[in-house]
Image (cartoon, rainbow, N blue to C red):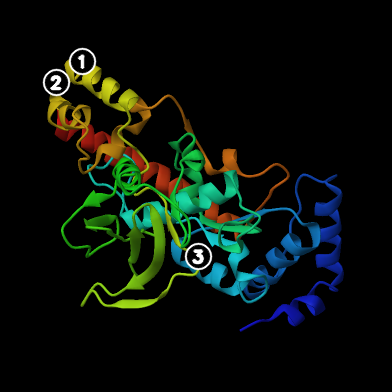
């Protein structure tokens, strides 16, 4: 349902108009807006639309982020509103985040770093909605520069090169695709289940020519409708096993034999559960979501007191689990 007309009426409010003017002028670094929670989507949508600047909306929890994003999509073009979800695991746990979570995060980072003007689905972003946990968590630098595997009907591509690219993007090769992050090859047919899609896609090759790309059902493997936008498959992990990462893992295994089981597998190019916990020592640099926002972006904190309290709780909890994790390792 579209409420664009309602937004036109709301922006005439004097307080909101003043805030929009201050944001557009750029002469005030901080503006407080006080109002009911129901007014937040209107204020954020108005700021994004009237100023033309990207907006980062920070919420206290992931559920609030989902609700806010859903409301914003009724006020703004839906393809311009994205969620930046947090991991379901703590950064130092021996558990890897789900591939669909990673895929959604990398899709957002790719659009922030390299928006495509010819496709609204991968074009510029107007609002990024993120729980404070995602804002606080450091991530591997340069994730937005990772190339997704992109194919379109009528184009040409070497199937072997595509398979190699999917493997490098941490997709698992299987006999039959059943879950996100998997791909299968049978003759000239390539099945891929990107973490950002509801259904897997089937790519039919004739030599090096791509004849057709369709969705299909996991349950019975029957084809569905044609995928108009083709295949767009972002990586499934935020830590890819490049030569540099493998070399560092090999060196660290000698310095920390207590982590040998984990590091030796990484050094051999085997993706293991929880390897993301070692990302800070396996890559050159880490960064925050704030570091990758386009120049001129604005941040809107929804209910600052709750966000501040939630942030303090997250830091305290992470520190406790970090100490317990290393104690168990020792």
Residue 302 in percent (x, y) is at 61, 60
Say which quadrant the C terminus sits in: top left
Residue, disc 2: 257
SS label for mark 2: helix
Front position in the image: 218 or 139: 218
Disc number at residue 229? Answer: 3
Task: Give the residue drawn at x 69%, y 64%.
Answer: 44
Front position in the image: 279 or 218: 218
Residue 197: tell me if it is visible.
no
Where is 15 relative to 324, above or below?
Answer: below
Where is 73 relative to 293, above or below?
Answer: below
Seen in the image, is 173 located left or right of residue 45?
A: left
Mark 3 is surrounded, within 10 Å at the Cα level, by few (under 14), some (14 to 19) or many (20 or more) other residues, namely few
Mark 2 is surrounded, within 10 Å at the Cα level, by few (under 14), some (14 to 19) or many (20 or more) other residues, namely few
Where is 183 relative to 257, above or below?
Answer: below
Real-space CA distance between mark 2 and mark 1, rounded to the nearest whole angstrom: 6 Å
SS label for mark 3: loop
Residue, disc 1: 255
Give whichever of discs 2 and 3 has the lower sequence position.
3
Where is 30 relative to 65, above or below?
Answer: above
Front position in the image: 137 or 291: 291
Residue 188 in percent (x, y) is at 27, 58
Real-space CA distance between mark 1 and mark 3, rounded to the nearest whole angstrom: 48 Å
Pointers 2 and 1 in contact (C-beta within 8 Å) = no
Residue 248 in percent (x, y) is at 29, 21
Say which quadrant the N terminus sits in: bottom right
Task: Give the residue drawn at x 22%, y 65%.
Answer: 178
Q: Residue furthest front?
A: 207
């Amino acid at each position: 349902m579209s409420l664009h007309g309602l937004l036109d009426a709301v922006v005439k409010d004097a307080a909101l108009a003043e805030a929009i003017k201050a944001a557009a002028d750029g002469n005030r670094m901080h503006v407080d807006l006080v109002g009911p929670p129901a007014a937040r989507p209107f204020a954020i949508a108005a700021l994004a639309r009237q100023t033309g600047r990207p907006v980062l909306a920070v919420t206290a929890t992931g559920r609030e982020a989902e609700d806010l994003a859903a409301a914003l999509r009724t006020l703004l073009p839906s393809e311009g509103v994205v969620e930046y979800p947090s991991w379901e695991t703590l950064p130092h746990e021996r558990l890897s985040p789900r591939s669909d979570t990673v895929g959604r995060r990398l899709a957002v980072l790719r659009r922030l770093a390299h928006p495509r003007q010819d496709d609204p689905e991968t074009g510029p972003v107007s609002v990024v909605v993120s729980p404070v946990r995602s804002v606080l968590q450091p991530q591997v630098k340069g994730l937005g520069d990772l190339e997704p595997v992109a194919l379109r009907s009528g184009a040409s591509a070497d199937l072997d090169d595509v398979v190699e690219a999917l493997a490098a993007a941490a997709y698992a090769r299987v006999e039959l695709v059943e879950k996100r992050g998997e791909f299968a090859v049978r003759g000239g047919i390539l099945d891929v289940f990107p973490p950002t899609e509801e259904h897997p896609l089937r790519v039919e090759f004739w030599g090096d020519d791509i004849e057709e790309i369709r969705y299909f059902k996991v349950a019975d493997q029957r084809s569905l409708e044609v995928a108009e936008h083709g295949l767009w498959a972002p990586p499934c992990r935020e830590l890819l096993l490049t030569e540099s990462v493998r070399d560092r893992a090999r060196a660290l295994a000698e310095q920390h034999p207590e982590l040998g089981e984990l590091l030796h597998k990484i050094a051999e190019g085997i993706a293991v559960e929880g390897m993301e916990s070692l990302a800070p020592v396996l890559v050159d640099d880490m960064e925050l979501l704030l570091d990758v926002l386009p120049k001129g972006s604005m941040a809107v904190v929804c209910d600052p007191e709750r966000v501040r309290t939630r942030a303090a709780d997250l830091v305290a909890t992470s520190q406790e689990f970090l100490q317990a994790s290393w104690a168990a390792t020792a």
